[in-house]
């Protein structure tokens, strides 16, 4: 088989894979313009004429823009906390050698394997005793502990950081915290940005924990608000409205990905060539 044929097969496979990934998104946008009856009775990639009706349905159940604001109020601080504290923890585990360091790393790996739902009951009891139910604090502060992000950034840092840079900075009299913020963190930025995308998406789409902890409808995040459409009695006619609300909720994720996606390739390729 010639090189051109192999290349053609590869490109054709990539195109098919891209279409497979894009088609569900296109279908979601198309269904946002169709009525619930049409969605339940037929399958089509042609836009409908029920967009205004679906928007009226969404507006009648909740304030979509208030849900946007509430979700951003949780997702942005949680993402920042995840990125910063995971980076500084990964730096400590990668650079410093201290007693118990390997054990801490082992604990982090173990916690990566434990589903968060298993600790949900105990977490709720703790939040209730702290009188933080119906507050955004328990949705934001726990983001500091992100075992998967710490593990990824540690491995990333080991592949890109030259210890000679740290030694040179210490000889020049730089403090450890100064070294982290001015030298190490910029080097980690591609990896931090990559994990921040995942952290933002996770916090933006979080449904179970906000549903349990938030009691006031005006504090509901967007996924919880959208779920009110699914739990309504007229779920069949609300199908188009559900698709419209979900399609609109994806916009912030696309914006974040658009600005940070260039770092994904940088973080993946980092360490591929190491001197």
Image (cartoon, helix red, strand yellow):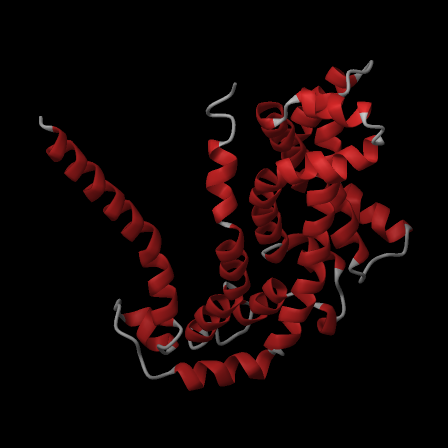
Q: Residue 143 placed where, x, y %? A: 73, 46
Number of marks drawn: 0
Q: Is residue 115 visible?
A: no
The N terminus, quarter of image: top left
* Residue nearer the viewer, 87 or 53: 87
Dividing the picture into quarters, in which one does residue 92 lie? top right
Q: Residue 251 placed where, x, y %? A: 50, 65
* Residue nearer the viewer, 146 or 87: 87
Q: Residue drawn at (71%, 52%), measured in percent from left and top?
A: 78
Horizontally, residue 208 falls left or right of residue 260, namely: right
Horizontally, residue 35 falls left or right of residue 275, namely: left
When the figure is inspected, residue 241 is found, relative to residue 10, above or below; the finding is below
Q: Is residue 2 visible?
A: yes
Instruction: Give the residue at the far top of this rendering.
Output: 99
Instruction: Give the residue at the far right of this rendering.
Output: 130
Q: Residue 85 placed where, x, y %? A: 75, 40
* Residue nearer the viewer, 204 or 209: 204
Instruction: Give the residue at the far front of this rendering.
Output: 172
When the figure is inspected, residue 72 is found, relative to residue 165, above or below; the finding is below
Q: Residue drawn at (57%, 52%), measured in percent from left and top?
A: 201
Q: Residue 45 placed where, x, y %? A: 26, 68
When the figure is inspected, residue 220 is found, relative to residue 20, above or below; the finding is below
Dividing the picture into quarters, in which one does residue 64 lie? bottom right
Q: Residue drawn at (46%, 67%), measured in percent from left and top?
A: 247
């Amino acid at each position: 088989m010639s090189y051109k044929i192999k290349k053609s097969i590869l490109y054709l496979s990539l195109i098919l894979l891209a279409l497979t990934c894009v088609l569900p998104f296109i279908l979601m946008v198309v269904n946002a313009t169709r009525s619930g009856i049409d969605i339940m009775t037929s399958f089509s990639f042609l836009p409908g004429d029920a967009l205004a009706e679906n928007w009226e349905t969404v507006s009648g159940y909740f304030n979509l823009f208030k849900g946007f604001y509430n979700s951003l109020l949780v997702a942005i601080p949680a993402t920042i906390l995840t990125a910063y504290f995971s980076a500084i923890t990964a730096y400590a585990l990668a650079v410093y050698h201290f007693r118990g360091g390997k054990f801490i790393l082992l604990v982090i790996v173990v916690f990566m394997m434990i589903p968060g739902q298993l600790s949900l009951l105990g977490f709720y009891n703790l939040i209730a005793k702290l009188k933080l139910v119906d507050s955004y604090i328990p949705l934001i502060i726990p983001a500091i502990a992100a075992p998967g992000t710490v593990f990824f950034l540690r491995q990333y840092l080991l592949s890109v950081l030259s210890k000679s840079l740290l030694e040179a900075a210490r000889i020049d009299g730089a403090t450890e915290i100064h070294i982290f913020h001015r030298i190490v963190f910029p080097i980690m930025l591609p990896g931090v940005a990559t994990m921040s995308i995942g952290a933002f998406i996770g916090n933006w789409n979080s449904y179970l924990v906000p549903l349990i902890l938030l009691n006031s409808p005006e504090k509901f995040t967007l996924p919880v608000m959208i779920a009110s459409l699914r739990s309504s009695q007229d779920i069949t006619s609300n199908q188009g409205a559900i698709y419209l609300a979900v399609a609109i909720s994806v916009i912030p994720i696309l914006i974040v990905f658009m600005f940070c996606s260039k770092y994904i390739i940088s973080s993946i390729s980092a360490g591929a060539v190491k001197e």
